[in-house]
Image (cartoon, helix red, strand yellow):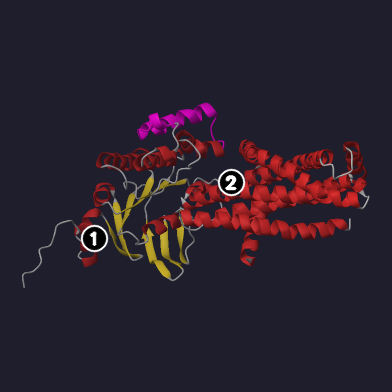
Amino acid sequence: MLSDIGRMLLLLRETLISLPAAWRQRAKVFDQLFEIGNASLFMACLLSLFIGGVLALQTGPVMSDRGVTSFIGGMVGLAMCKELGPVMMAVLIAGRIGSAIAAEVGSMRAYQEIDALRTMNINPIHYLVLPRLIAICVALPLLVVFSTLIGWMGGALVVVVNPAINLSYTGYVNSLGDMVAGGDILNGLIKSLVFALIIGLVSCHQGMETIGGPRGVGRSVTKAVVNSIALILVFDYFLTRMMINL
Amino acid sequence: MEIHGVSKSFGEQEVLRDVDLVVEPGEIFVIMGPSGSGKSVLLKHVIGLETPDAGEVLVDGKSATAEGIRDHCRMAMVFQSGALLNSLTLAENVGLYLREHQLKPEPEIEQIIDEKLTLVDLTEARDKLPAQLSGGMRKRAAIARALVIEPQLLLYDEPTSELDPLMAATVGREIVNLQRRQGVTSMVVSHDRDLAFGIADRMALIRDGRILCVGRPEEIRANGDPAVAEFLNANFKHEPESSE
């Protein structure tokens, strides 16, 4: 575990050093961005709509009973942008994109394609890791913004159609506007950037460390997803703790 | 290319034991030996994909694992499996080196790709993915990709495995042609005796990670070592059992 973390930090260092080569790899970055968007946009939309809806559904009637309906919009708004949007999107991307990266890079490792790159004096970090890491770091914060907006809409929909919640659409929007500040959205974006780094690094690292044939690739994919999700949740706590004090 | 006292182990398994070899510029040097004898691992040491536990590999006087060695000496390797990038077409695989290093303008790269694919008789498969090709076609494509580098040192790992006899002969002739036309130094790892004796200027026999003998093909044939004779004379003939 510790040696894995050490090797991931080394991978991060090498990737940061190779950043000047990013412009040359822009075509691959766009390919990856397209792939991430294509693979996750619909699922992000579906998840966010229902998460926002469930938040309103669970809290709405309770808050209505206690006469604090004016906080429902703010509660859904804050939960989506500071916590559920970043974490749920990170888990989604870890499952859909992190696994795909670990499988692709792992297969390349198992079938000597990475060795072939090295013999051609092509740095695998430049060719494989850098474009994927940049694409995830751009895509995840954008997905989080998208997810937050859809989540807010999901909450609004439930508030409007559920008679047990005694709040109008305007009341919901006003509450959301009153309680959610720009800093809260920034808070979620910072989290999502850290989560993106975790997913990209863990997945590329697991792929590059693949040993053996198809079974080895399978092991790498499982480890990439499980380790990414575990690290996302651990970092989420510490990031929240840190940003509460800001 | 010089190999001095190279040893390598993977865990408990000792793969190379104190290997010494010298390959002269412009020669075709064949390393023969049974499967699992350490031939491919030795080749990986030469191209810098493996680091020896002991000893050193020098290419043109510099360590094979030194920074910038591939700028100092152009090297290429044809892998046993071909190791083509599965997400790229054949033409993209062949042009990968030139495009990634931005060595030529695009029209010239296309021209070189066509030239190399014609050389290995794969022009019609240029837009196919490696998964759509036979093992032999993948091997030939890997050779085309290696030739694009215009290597000074070209390493072949089992270049004729998975090839039919006609294509194996073509590949063998191409290895010789490259040496004659461009003075390419070639190091070939193979257990194909016909290929080895057909193209080698010098050869070595390796077994259990040790070099058994080095010399010209006629010297290897005349070698009296029973282990060498066993490998060279192995055949499919059924030995009749003794009646006693």
| Secondary element type, mark 1 | helix
B218 and B87: which is toward the camera: B87
Q: Residue at x 39, y 41 (%)?
A: B138
- The answer to whether residue A169 is left or right of residue B165 is right
- The answer to whether residue B79 is left or right of residue A138 is left
**What's the amino acid at mark 1?**
Phe
Disc 1 to disc 2, how far (Cα)? 42 Å
B52 and B83: which is toward the camera: B83
x and y, in percent, of residue A3 in the image? 62, 65
**Numbered range of the magenta stretch:** B102-126
Q: Provide the residue designation for mark 2.
A: A128
Relative to B128, say whether A151 is above or below. Answer: below
Q: Provide the residue designation for mark 1.
A: B231
**What's the amino acid at mark 2?**
Leu
Q: Residue furthest front?
A: A163
Q: Chain of mark 2?
A: A
Q: Is residue B62 visible?
A: no
Q: Is residue A60 visible?
A: yes
| Among the 4 quarters of the image, the one containing residue A223 | bottom right
Q: Residue at x 49, y 35 (%)?
A: B92
| Secondary element type, mark 2 | helix
Q: Residue at x 48, y 67 (%)?
A: B53
